[in-house]
Image (tube, rainbow, N blue to C red):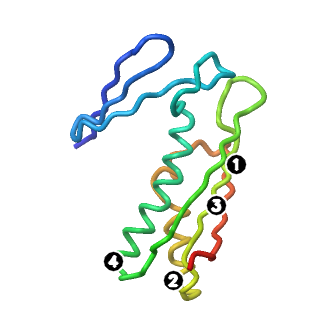
Amino acid sequence: MGVNISGKFMGGLAMAMTHDLSQASIVTDPPLDNGGQGKSFSPTDLVATAVASCMMSVMAIYGKKERLDLAGMAVTVEKHMSADLPRRISQLDVVLKMPVGLTNEQRQSLEKIGNSCPVIQSLHPSIILNKSYVYSVV
């Protein structure tokens, strides 16, 4: 069974996208440097967001199963676009801030799981993906 997402052109360059099962919606708008108004996530911003969210989600699933306290886990992701054509994501820099109280074994397991999330597995291999885990959350 697949997941259905539907979209509607909103005028200008904005698109309203709806997750059909939940009816949750988002509006996308291209960045200023690509003719949009930059008023919302661009489609490529959503790819970067999906990587960060997916990494945390699969680690949270593992953490719940293993009864790990991942309170305070946070992420930032910086998206870089190619300077040449075709326009595309060239690099993503992901920094995950993790709790300090995890053992080395737990850290290794979480990082392995985070690094292999389904979104990362779906990215084009030409995208440079820099991931770092910082254990600083108290």
What is the three-letter code of the residue carrying label 2? Gln
In the rendered structure, which disc, 4 or 3, sits on the residue that comes first in sequence? Answer: 4
Residue 128 - label:
1
What is the three-letter code of the residue carrying label 4? Lys
In the rendered structure, which disc, 4 or 1, sits on the residue that comes first in sequence? Answer: 4
Q: CA distance from mark 3 to mark 1?
A: 14 Å
Which of labels 3 and 2 is toward the front?
3
What is the three-letter code of the residue carrying label 1? Ile
Q: Secondary structure at mark 3?
A: strand
Q: Which residue is mark 3?
A: 95
User: Compared with residue 96, is residue 83 higher up or lower down, i.e. above or below?
Assistant: above
Q: Which residue is mark 2?
A: 106
Q: Secondary structure at mark 1?
A: strand
Q: Which residue sits at x=63%, y=16%?
A: 35
In the rendered structure, which disc, 3 or 1, sits on the residue that comes first in sequence? Answer: 3
Q: Which residue is mark 4?
A: 65
Q: Nearer the viewer, residue 2 or 60?
A: 60
